[in-house]
Structure formats: structure tokens, C-alpha cells
Amino acid sequence: MTKKALLDLSFIEIRAKLLEVAAFLDRLDRAEGDTDFRIASFRQAIKELSEPEAGRVRRILELLSDPTLEPVEAASGKSAAGAWPEFKD
Amino acid sequence: MRYIEPHAHMVSRTTNDYTAMVTAGCRAVCEPAFWAGFDRSSAKGFYDYFCQLTEYEPRRAALFGLPHFCWLCINPKEAENVALAGEVIAMIPEFLGRGNVLGIGEIGLNKNTRNEMKILEKHVELAVAHDQLILVHTPHLEDKLKGTRLIVDLLKSHPGVRPERVIIDHVEEHTASIALDAGFWAGITLYPDSKCTPARAVDILETHGMERLWLNSACDWGVSDPLAVPKAAMEMRRRGHSDDEIDRLIYENPRAFLSQCPRFRID
């Protein structure tokens, strides 16, 4: 598929998703209280979108992941948060 | 179009879903044992669930002309209770001879704990001892990368595990290579929010190739879509993939893996 054909196929759909991200960040600014670890990695992930090399999805998923290798002693719950709580910029 | 749904939790779905799947071309559905959304209070609850998977649900699917197969285990979400998990694992062999049982699954990790690792190891021992296929669940979101590494390391270290008889499910862009490079099969799960969209799934197969890959909806009681596989086929068609390529990915590939179990017969 050519770049032009892909743009014709998907640009409007992806443009809408980009605007959703921007609207979410504006909404978050208007909300009261503090953010948490999730938004720190989210903002770093957004920077990754501007990188020129392919592999952006993989790098963003890695950035949102627990990079350690040791099993944990016990689970604090059953669900996942979507970002690693110990992420640091 | 024809396809196999290799991972769907049909006990949580309606008859309308069965109708829609069959209408879309589904030729067989495979149901791994799953967490109920709450912890079961005893091994007897699992006994009833295994009866549901091996007796009642195949009859319900048959009303729609759909062959139904299943996998048995205690899901990693309940593996923190090691004593209960041990009781359930001890009960599984009496079900392995039933006509629609494909193997042990979906086993794996959820929060990557030591207890989950112990129970995963017991399941692997059980599968090897009974020469069963293995279906592996990899954890969600931030836990997936670590969990996939731990699972693959555990499986590779077991001399009785044959990678071609194991599928590592729920891979995404950062974990597909971990499973495939180690010789395992890999499953891509199509979820609206928390796993892969059809578009990303097609990206993965365009970059990794189609060998040892399958797609599934893993539809259950949560936000999920029982028609996700045919929708991914639509995405492939939109991008110019041929009917043969689509058929290979959504029918021939799962058939090739599942046919390693002699009970899997759909033709």
C-alpha cells in the first residue's frame, strides 16, 4: 500500500484519535486535585510519537511496562493500571 | 470467509453472539478456562465449571451448528490461593479424556507473583505428564512484558515442553518476538481497549509474518467483541491482503496448531 493510499484510508480516523488525546489532556488540566504516575509515563509516551524511527508502538508499550524481572512476593490486587507505578522521567 | 475462534469465553456470551459468529463464518470455537470475575469459593465450583465447559456449553454451541472445544486449568487470577489451585489441578486429569478437551489453558501469570509462578509450573508439569497442548495467558498492560519474559524463561527451562505445542496468547508489539523467536506459537487478542485493535494486529502480522500466529477475540463478560476476528479480516482486506492470506491466518493457522490434539476435528 502506498503512503498516499494509507492516508486516504486512515487519516480522518487517526486525526479524530489525536484530537481525543488533546481533549483528554485539556480535560485533565481542568479537573481538580493531583495526577498520579500514569500521566507521567503518558506524557513521555506522547514525546515518543515525534521520534523519527519506526517502532513507536513497541517503545511506548515498553515505556508503560514494568521493566524488572524478579517475580513479586504477592499481588496487591488483580487488575493492572496501564502504566508502571515506579516510572521516572 | 471461514474462520476459527480459538479463544472465546462463550459461557459469558449470549445466543445472539453464537448466531452472529456462525453467520460471519465461524467454523469452531475454543474456550479456555477462565476467571469468573470473582473468586470461586471451593474446588467444587471448578468441578461444576469444568462440567459446564465439557458437557453443557458444547451442547449449546451445537444448537448453532458450531463445534465447541475447551481448555482446562485454574486461571492465574486465582493462583494466589495455592492450596485451592493445587486441589483444582489435582482434579483436572479426570476431565482430560472428555471429547472436546484440547489441553491445559489458559495458564500463565497475572501480577507476576511467586505463587502464580508456582501454579504455572504445576500446570506445565501436568500438561507434560499428560502430553497436552498448552495455551498461555500473558498478563495485562504494564505487567505483560515482564510476565511474558518470565513465562517464556520457565517454559524454555522445562525439558518436556515442546514449543510447537505451546501458544503464548495476548502478544502485542513488545512481546510478539519474545514468543515467536523462542519457537512458540503466538496469539494476538483483539480487544477494543486493553489489548490489540484489528489495525494493530494487522500491523504485527505485516511486520512479523504470519507463521505461527493466530488471532482471537477472547470475548468474555467484559468489554470485548465476539466478531473481532472477522473484523480483523475486514481490515486485512481493506489493506489489500488476499483471500488466501486471510484464510491462512484466521482458519488454517489455528487449525494447524489445534490439530496437534487428535480431538480437534472440524471437517
Image: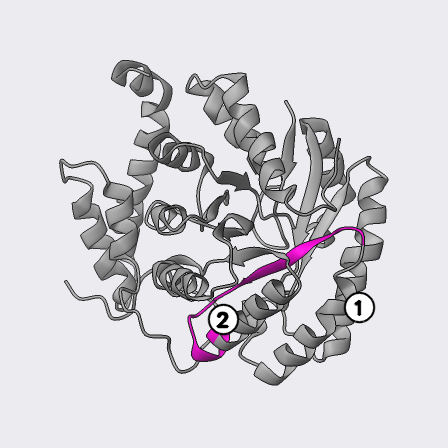
Q: Please, what is the three-letter code of the amino acid marked with disc 2?
A: Lys
Q: Please, what is the three-letter code of the amino acid marked with disc 1?
A: Asp
Residue B86 lies, with reference to residue B157, above or below; the image says below
Residue A54 lies, with reference to residue B103, above or below; the image says above
Image colouring: one colour
Give the class, few, some or many, for how many residues have Cα within 10 Å of label 2's Cα (few <14, many ≥20): few
**Whole-percent x and y of residue B162?**
51, 54
Residue at horizontal 39 percent and vertical 32 percent from the top: B209
Side of B70 relative to B115 (left or right): right
Query: Mark 2 — residue?
Result: A78
Label 2 vs label 1, nearer the camera = 1
Residue A72 lies, with reference to residue B228, above or below; the image says below
Side of B231 relative to B196 (left or right): right
Query: Mark 1 — residue?
Result: B48
**Whole-percent x and y of residue B141?**
39, 57
What chain does badge 1 belong to?
B
The span picked out in magenta is B99-117
